[in-house]
Amino acid sequence: MQTTDKRSDRFALVTGGGSGIGEAICHRLARDVTAVAVLDIDVDAARRVAEDIKHAGGNAIPVHGNVADRVSIEEAVNRVHAELGPVTVLVNNAAIEGFQLFEDIEEASWERVMEVNLKGPYIAVQAVLADMRGAAWGRIVNISSLAAQIGAFKMAHYSASKGGVTSLTRTLAIELGAQGITVNAIAPSFIDTPMARRAIAASDLPIPFEEILKSYPIPRFGRPEEVAAACAFFASDEASYITGQLLGVNGGAAF
Ligand SMILES: NC(=O)c1ccc[n+]([C@@H]2O[C@H](COP(=O)([O-])OP(=O)(O)OC[C@H]3O[C@@H](n4cnc5c(N)ncnc54)[C@H](O)[C@@H]3O)[C@@H](O)[C@H]2O)c1
């Protein structure tokens, strides 16, 4: 089911669109919006996803960009303007993970995680705000994490960055609501993506991963498409009176 009628003037930018959840979001949004800009630091991955969308009948362009770098993101947005149009749907999805006990986290590692995961959304929102204000309509969806809600072993920097994403969401919702721009966040639990597989392999969890999944009311890995469906709803016209919210896509892992 489409959540919006296709319009000729609705363009989405998805950061980290070249893999996992971002890839599923690009595919899902391509059904609703006019075109999707698949932004990734890995431009080959972005190209592959954009090609897949086009083969499936949608419209997408790959865009190289590093969310931690303002110049790179401003250049990327300029490309989207030239090839598509103003960005009125922004999904802040790009993130990196790290696995270390808190006392072992070096400053460089802390800063890198914060730069991508928290400064990235700050830069990207600033880069597209004029577009959304110009349209008097905008949708910002930030991908947070269950780690922000309940913590995550050996992921203090990651969980802190995602807590920041949730708080940023709430304040942006307050500042932008009167301008027709909604800002919401999604907190996924374990979703079957390359990042989750890396996390399971590297984090040396105190409880086996399978046991954690079995403890969820829905006792299985989540699918990227299940996060994408929630994102598409927040990005739709139907979600016009919903802002500042955090939605768990987590099999009931947290309420
Ligand atoms: N997979 C999970 O279990 C899970 C759980 C909770 C939250 N999340 C969140 O969901 C989002 C997507 O995660 P995923 O599992 O699909 O990860 P992933 O590693 O599979 O994909 C992340 C993508 O972001 C890109 N990227 C990384 N740094 C970038 C940068 N500086 N600029 C631009 N692009 C960059 C990568 O190249 C990659 O294509 C992230 O925000 C992650 O924190 C994932």
Image: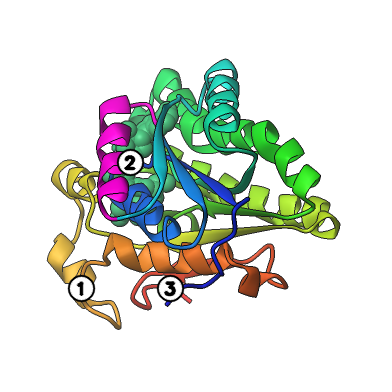
- Give the amino acid type for the residue marked by disc 3 in the picture: Ala
Instruction: Tell me which residue sits at (39%, 24%) in the image.
Output: 109
Residue hosting label 2: 50
Q: Nearer the viewer, residue 16 or 244?
A: 16
In the rendered image, which quarter is residue 188 located in?
Answer: bottom left
Determine if residue 144 is in view: yes
Tag 2 or tag 3, which sits nearer the N-term? 2
Tag 2 or tag 1, which sits nearer the N-term? 2
Tally of numbered discs: 3
Instruction: Tell me which residue sits at (24%, 37%) in the image.
Output: 48
Marks 3 and 2 sit apart, C-alpha to C-alpha, by 34 Å
Please provide percent x and percent y for residue 218: 27, 81
Q: Is mark 2 on a helix, strand or loop?
A: helix
Eye-nearest disc, 3 or 2: 2
Please provide percent x and percent y for residue 163: 55, 50
Residue 231 vs 51, above or below: the answer is below
Outermost residue toward the bottom in this view: 217
Q: What stretch is highlighted in magenta?
A: 40-56
| Quarter of the render that holds ligand 1 | top left
**161 horizontally vs 222: left or right:** right
- Give the amino acid type for the residue marked by disc 1 in the picture: Arg
- Label for residue 109? none
Tag 1 or tag 3, which sits nearer the N-term? 1
Residue hosting label 3: 254
Residue hosting label 1: 220
Instruction: Tell me which residue sits at (76%, 49%) in the image.
Output: 135
